[in-house]
Image: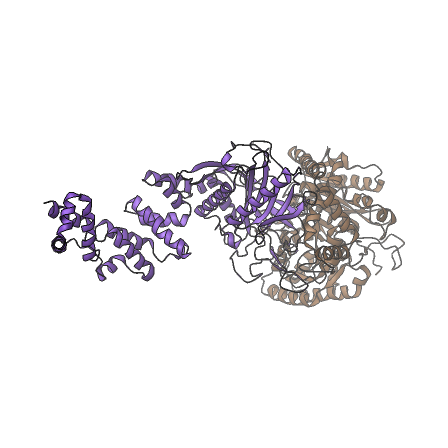
Chain colours: A purple, B brown
């Protein structure tokens, strides 16, 4: 572990108010991300989620006598890929260590991890915090201390039997990446932005599905408070926080708890705490004195993990475009930082947008995706994967506006029809007669009729050109909204003003 | 008809081929011998006559169709440390009570694929921790050798050495044609020396550890105990293999070890390390060593004095590294998944009760030592330093080999077999550990070593010499070992049972 370095300038907007002075939060996150792989880290057992209890267990996972771990190369590749995505140092030689402790869901009596020589060293993640009221984002660099590979444990179940606990080993031995940040985070918003960004990077890379509700990603949160810019305070570690919302609550509670203690003249005990989402509070799990002595030592069953630069280069060549690069490209293509940030925040949104924007205007496409589609999804409580409107359908709607078949207003109706009923937008417009009327003859008849019926309004409009809007409205009403507004406008001006 | 249990593996093989007798006949002879005499030695802790006779019948069919494997129809005993599918596998520990694996160790699978016949599981020190076979949950093993003038049922019972005491005793008492053994600090070579048999510990990584109950993973290595050097070569040729299920196993082809037997050693440079001359070493060990030198010199080898300066640190370093690994390897025996469980009012108490009842004293001692040396604050002083010592020991050997030494000759043990229940040994575990003073260096350096019987002490007990070779050059050891064997002759215990 390198010494703690403060890389940040205190920012008053992040401060917690105190009795005598403000307080600044210092946060570091240890994120456990389950590696996306078909088999476990050291056994051939499946990693499929949701299988029957103890269905995904090999002899190695169950720690049968004489069984030996064999590294799954696919997991190594994923870790290297993730390291590259975090702009981090890749270590061509790393070593697996045993972390020894007794627990029923740890069949070997030790977890194979990497303490002294991790596969990935220091890196950096840039987060966008905001937008603020002016729509501005703040870019903040959060340092990565390391990433190492380790085995997950199984699950103890205490509610299956009156006097016994049961153990499910399906997760036992599944590959995890522990991604440790430096203590560079200074607010709850930053912490949320960091974990969101990290999850986004992992999903772009395809190295972790990031599903916190399934436990594929969970965080240990280290929190301390200090006088702004002062010495680092004593930290407490909040274990196994499994949603971004809970993380915010846990940090908020923990910061206030620590501030209260300090303001009353107390001191913070370094300890491990648990967050109780029901009560919204953290409580002590074990103190520093009660901490386990894990007796780490190099696992003699495994040779050091070694690969050459060519291996890393090959993985580097396969890297997809990551969110930062994509955001900059979208901005180059004419999108605002706000729109670009939203679109790249989630790989599935970015992919969807890229399909929609193919051959279409970036700004228009972004508006439809963000305001209409994401808005509607949000309102319906649906994810993008569940969207009733596909990228092709949305693209079709935009095409119909672009070529003047429908007006923007009709397009909103069309969107709703597609949302509710599905179908090809062009066909719907055709079948339901939604195309705007560009036949000047038909529009002219409507215009003439209205002018004839409202001579006083015509007089007013001559004096006050804005009044023409009233006539447009009337014509649109008479044509069921299908008249091309531009054509209506032109005709009215010609006829009223001569 | 000849007593088939008297024949070596090579003789059985040749007899099968010549249709002089069948594997079923030989196997039945062993089954009968075990039935009649195992009680005198306690060498087998589980016998599998049904499996043996079935395998023998299958072997006879293969022999008849001229399709015999390397060990076709050869009745062998298997150390209880090897996982054998559906058969007792407990490393002679109480904590693995009732454990029968659903899988087969790579080494035994290799042997069965080559036609070997399994007579049963052999006694050993619990988890291979011991040098006398007295730590076994199944009781001590009696050495077929007794001191001159004591060769009766009532004569002082001697240990066969350990941890592969059951293997050595069974081979010496002709209760199997050959046996698998394992060696972490001398557990093949010391019992071989104590019983007048040949014990071969190959290079670390030559045999797969898959399915072997682990003691100290960086030191454990499978190998045979046999009647003679040729049989050891035949057995190792079957036991050794590459194995993708053990990443520390070498991906190297297995040579024809038997071809090395009887090859001239003219011009071979044999090193004699001065550091192996211990204070207070019995004269007869010294004499035996001199005789060994003469045997090799007479056969054309060049004897050279060498120095292995870090030798004296090997045993202390070994007793840090091996227990450290063991303390972690044995954590899985917790009463949760298999084997013994002694209930308690909560999980911690269940662990404590189970491990207190399930492990013997020596195993507990080593778990405690290992836990201590890996503890925060002690790790660097013990474990890290021991690993550095290990590197230096390895380098000592490398320098000698680089200087042109082909193999190294040393005594195998500092004494002959001692009595079961020896008070001095029982009172001081370190005295017991000293049994391995000549053998642990080889494990620490990952080298191959062979113990070959070379003479008798003044009480009529066998003594062995050890040859140490370059990594993966087991052939040199078979070559030189067969020269010592040819010069020294064979040593059979006088039958008292």
Quadrant where the N terminus of chain A sits is top right
Residue A345: x and y in percent read 42, 45
- In the displayed structure, does residue B364 sit left or right of residue A41? right
Quick one: B461 or A103, which is closer to the camera?
A: A103
| Number of numbered discs on residues | 0
Q: Quadrant of residue B142?
A: bottom right
Q: Residue at x 39, y 54 (%)?
A: A377
Residue A156: x and y in percent read 62, 57
Quick one: A492 or B341, which is closer to the camera?
A: A492
Residue A96: x and y in percent read 60, 44
Q: Is residue B254 visible?
A: no
Quick one: B36 or A496, which is closer to the camera?
A: A496
Q: Is residue A365 visible?
A: yes
Quadrant where the C terminus of chain A sits is top left
Residue B488: x and y in percent read 77, 46
Q: Is residue B124 above or below residue A366?
A: below
Q: Residue at x 59, y 54 (%)?
A: A172
Q: Quadrant of residue A317?
A: top left
Quick one: A487 or B322, which is closer to the camera?
A: A487
């Amino acid at each position: 572990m390198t010494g703690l370095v403060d890389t940040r300038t205190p920012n008053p907007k992040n401060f917690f108010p105190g009795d005598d002075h403000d307080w600044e939060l210092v946060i570091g996150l240890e994120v456990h991300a389950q590696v996306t792989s078909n088999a476990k880290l050291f056994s051939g057992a499946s990693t499929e989620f949701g299988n029957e209890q103890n269905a995904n267990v090999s002899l190695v996972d169950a720690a049968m006598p004489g069984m030996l771990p064999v590294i799954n190369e696919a997991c190594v590749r994923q870790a290297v890929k993730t390291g590259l995505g975090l702009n981090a140092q890749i270590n061509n030689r790393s070593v697996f260590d045993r972390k020894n402790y007794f627990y029923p869901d740890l069949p070997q009596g030790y977890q194979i991890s990497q303490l002294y020589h991790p596969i990935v060293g220091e890196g950096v993640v840039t987060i966008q915090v905001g937008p603020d009221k002016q729509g501005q984002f703040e870019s903040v660099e959060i340092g990565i201390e390391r990433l190492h590979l380790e085995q997950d444990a199984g699950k103890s179940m205490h509610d299956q039997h009156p006097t016994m606990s049961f153990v499910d080993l399906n997760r036992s031995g599944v590959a995890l990446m522990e991604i440790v940040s430096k203590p560079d985070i200074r607010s709850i918003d930053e912490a949320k932005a960091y974990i969101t960004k990290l999850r986004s990077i992992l999903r772009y890379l395809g190295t972790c599905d990031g599903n916190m509700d399934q436990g594929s990603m969970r965080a240990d949160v280290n929190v301390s408070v200090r006088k702004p810019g002062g010495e680092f305070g004593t930290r407490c570690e909040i274990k196994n926080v499994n949603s971004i919302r809970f993380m915010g609550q846990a940090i908020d509670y923990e910061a206030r708890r620590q501030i209260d203690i300090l303001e009353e003249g107390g001191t913070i005990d370094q300890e491990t705490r648990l967050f109780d989402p029901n009560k919204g509070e953290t409580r002590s799990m074990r103190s520093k004195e009660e901490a386990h002595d894990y007796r780490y030592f190099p696992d003699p069953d495994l040779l050091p993990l070694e690969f050459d630069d060519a291996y890393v280069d090959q993985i580097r060549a396969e890297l997809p475009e990551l969110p930062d690069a994509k955001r900059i490209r979208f901005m180059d293509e004419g999108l605002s930082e706000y729109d670009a940030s939203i679109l790249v925040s989630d790989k599935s949104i970015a992919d969807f947008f890229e399909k929609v924007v193919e051959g279409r205007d970036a700004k228009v496409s972004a508006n439809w995706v963000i305001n209409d589609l994401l808005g509607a999804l949000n309102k319906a409580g649906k994810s993008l994967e569940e969207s009733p409107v596909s990228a092709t359908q949305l693209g079709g709607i935009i095409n119909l506006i672009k070529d003047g078949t429908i007006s923007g207003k009709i397009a909103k109706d069309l969107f709703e029809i597609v949302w509710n009923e599905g179908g090809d937008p062009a066909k719907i417009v055709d079948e339901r007669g939604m195309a705007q009327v560009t036949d000047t003859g038909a529009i002219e008849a409507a215009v003439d009729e209205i002018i004839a019926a409202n001579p006083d309004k015509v007089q007013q409009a001559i004096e006050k050109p804005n009044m023409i809007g009233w006539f447009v409205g009337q014509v649109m009403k008479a044509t069921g909204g299908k008249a091309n507004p531009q054509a209506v406008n032109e005709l009215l001006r010609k006829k009223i003003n001569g | 008809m000849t007593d088939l249990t008297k024949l070596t593996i090579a003789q059985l093989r040749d007899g099968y081929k010549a249709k002089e007798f069948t594997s079923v006949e030989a196997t039945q002879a062993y089954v009968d011998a075990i039935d009649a005499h195992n009680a005198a030695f306690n060498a087998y802790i589980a016998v599998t006559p049904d499996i043996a006779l079935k395998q023998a019948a299958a072997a006879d069919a293969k022999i008849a169709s001229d399709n015999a494997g390397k060990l076709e129809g050869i009745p062998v005993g298997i150390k209880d440390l090897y996982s054998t599918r559906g058969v007792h596998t407990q490393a002679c520990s109480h904590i693995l009570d009732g454990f029968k694996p659903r899988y087969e160790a790579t080494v035994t699978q290799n042997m069965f694929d080559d036609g070997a016949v399994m007579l049963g599981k052999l006694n050993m020190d619990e988890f291979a921790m011991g040098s006398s076979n007295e730590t076994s949950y199944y009781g001590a093993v009696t050495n077929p050798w007794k001191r001159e003038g004591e060769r009766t049922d009532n004569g002082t019972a001697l240990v066969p050495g350990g941890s592969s005491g059951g293997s050595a005793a069974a081979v010496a008492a002709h209760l199997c044609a050959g046996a698998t053994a394992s060696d972490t600090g001398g557990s093949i070579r010391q019992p071989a020396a104590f019983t007048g048999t040949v014990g071969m510990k190959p290079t670390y990584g030559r045999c797969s550890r898959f399915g072997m109950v682990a003691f100290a993973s960086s030191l454990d290595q499978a190998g045979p105990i046999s009647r003679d050097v040729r049989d050891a070569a035949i057995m190792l040729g079957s036991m050794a293999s590459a194995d993708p299920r053990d990443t520390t196993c070498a991906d190297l082809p297995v040579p024809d070890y038997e071809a090395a037997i009887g090859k001239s050693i003219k011009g071979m440079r044999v090193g004699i390390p001065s550091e192996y001359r211990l204070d207070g070493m019995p004269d007869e060990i010294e004499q035996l060593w001199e005789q060994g030198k003469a045997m090799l010199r007479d056969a054309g080898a060049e004897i050279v004095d060498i120095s292995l300066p870090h030798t004296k640190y090997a045993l202390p370093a070994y007793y840090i590294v091996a227990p450290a690994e063991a303390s972690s390897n044995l954590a899985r025996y917790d009463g949760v998944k298999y084997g013994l469980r002694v209930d308690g009012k909560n999980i911690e108490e269940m662990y404590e009760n189970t491990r207190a009842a399930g492990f013997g004293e020596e195993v507990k001692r080593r778990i405690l030592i290992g836990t201590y040396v890996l503890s925060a604050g002690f790790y660097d002083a013990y474990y890290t330093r021991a690993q550095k010592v290990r590197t230096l020991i390895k380098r000592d050997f490398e320098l000698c080999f680089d200087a042109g030494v082909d193999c190294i000759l040393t005594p195998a043990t500092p004494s002959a077999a001692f009595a079961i229940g020896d008070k001095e040994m029982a009172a001081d575990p370190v005295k017991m550990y000293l049994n391995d003073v000549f053998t642990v260096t080889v494990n620490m350096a990952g080298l191959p070593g062979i113990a070959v019987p070379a003479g008798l002490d003044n009480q009529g007990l066998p003594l062995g010499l050890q040859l140490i070779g370059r990594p993966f050059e087991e052939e040199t050891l078979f070559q030189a070992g067969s020269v010592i064997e040819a010069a020294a002759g064979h040593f059979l215990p006088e039958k008292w049972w």
